[in-house]
Amino acid sequence: MQEIYKIAVVQMRSSEDKYENLKLSTDLVKESAKKKASLICFPEFQMAFSPIHQSSDELSKLAEPIKNGNFISVLSRSAKQEKIDIVATIYEKSNINNNKNRVYDTTVIINRKGRISLVYRKLHLYDALGYRESDNLLPGRTIEKPAKTLIGNIGIMMCYDVRFPEMSRILAVNGADILIAPSAWVHGIMKEEHWQIMLKARAIENGSYIIAPNQVGNVYSGRTMVVDPFGIVLLDMGNREGMEIVEIDKSRVKNIREILPLLKNRRIDVYRDNIRVFS
């Protein structure tokens, strides 16, 4: 039996003004609710675009706490008013001493009652291909267990995390049937090809939906995607800004995992003797 839900997926070009981005976000929440979406997903760096010349001090001044911070408080009120779940991202202030004013790159799931149901701090920082996110950002320390929502159990990754298949597998075996990866995927040689291939792979190998809202413009590639558990692309937004509504069938996860039982067929008895640390 099908269980169909509407998901709103946002591809945005965040400005450096967090108040402008917040206004756009609340407008999109209202629009998605009018279109009967159960969930709206925003990309990484929803709060603001951080240009490469921005210092850690400047970014730290922009960042906010989750509790009592304006950005999440406004979105929480919007979620409650519109009766919709929200996947949002912020620069989160850190209380860690000697962090050189670095902040967390954080995803927050806000439920339709306006309450926070999950907080995930990006685990893998993008120190690759000429970038060093660790100059301004702090790495998270945990993979958060999936959050239960109306549409299913949501596991969160962020951007560069997609390149690490261990993470999506851990989320899947911990109950995730939908993987959401808010991203700000930097454009470059082969970058869009990597993005498309890995999103399809993460969906297929775990029998999960994957929803990957992305930034567009500035230095980012766009190509926001939704992929179903069998690798079928349900959405590819190209380079256009805006919001799209996608229907997903919750029952499809169970059906695909039954005919292609990759999670059940794993040989954990063999794997555990072959895990090595690469240096």
Image (cartoon, rainbow, N blue to C red):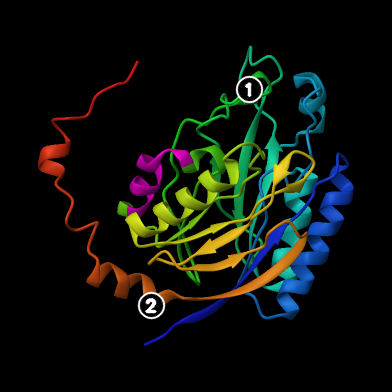
Q: What is the quadrant of the C terminus in the image? A: top left
- Report the residue at 66% width, 43% height from top: 184
- Give the answer, above or below, for where 275 lies relative to 243: above
Q: CA distance from mark 2 to mark 1?
A: 42 Å
- Give the answer, above or below, for where 215 lies relative to 160: below
Q: Which residue is mark 1?
A: 130
Kind of residue indicated by mark 1: Gly
Q: Which residue is mark 2?
A: 251
The number of numbered discs placed on residues in the rendered structure image is 2
Which quadrant holds residue 34?
bottom right
Q: Residue furthest bottom?
A: 1
Element marked by disc 1: loop
Element marked by disc 2: helix
Q: Nearer the viewer, residue 277 or 106?
A: 277
* Residue 165 in view, yes or no: yes
Magenta range: 163-172
Q: Nearer the viewer, mark 2 or mark 1?
A: 1
Question: Which label was assigned to residue 252?
Answer: none
Residue 136 position, x and y percent, is: 69, 23
Residue 252 position, x and y percent, is: 38, 75
Which quadrant holds residue 153?
bottom left
Residue 193 position, x and y percent, is: 54, 47
Kind of residue indicated by mark 2: Ser
- Report the residue at 77% width, 63% height from top: 242
- Give the answer, above or below, for where 113 lies relative to 46: below
Residue 170 within the magenta-colored segment of the rendering: yes
Check whether the beta carbons of the residues at disc 2 and disc 1 lie within 8 A of each other: no
* Residue 67 in view, yes or no: no
- Give the answer, above or below, for where 247 lies relative to 176: below
Residue 58 within the magenta-colored segment of the rendering: no
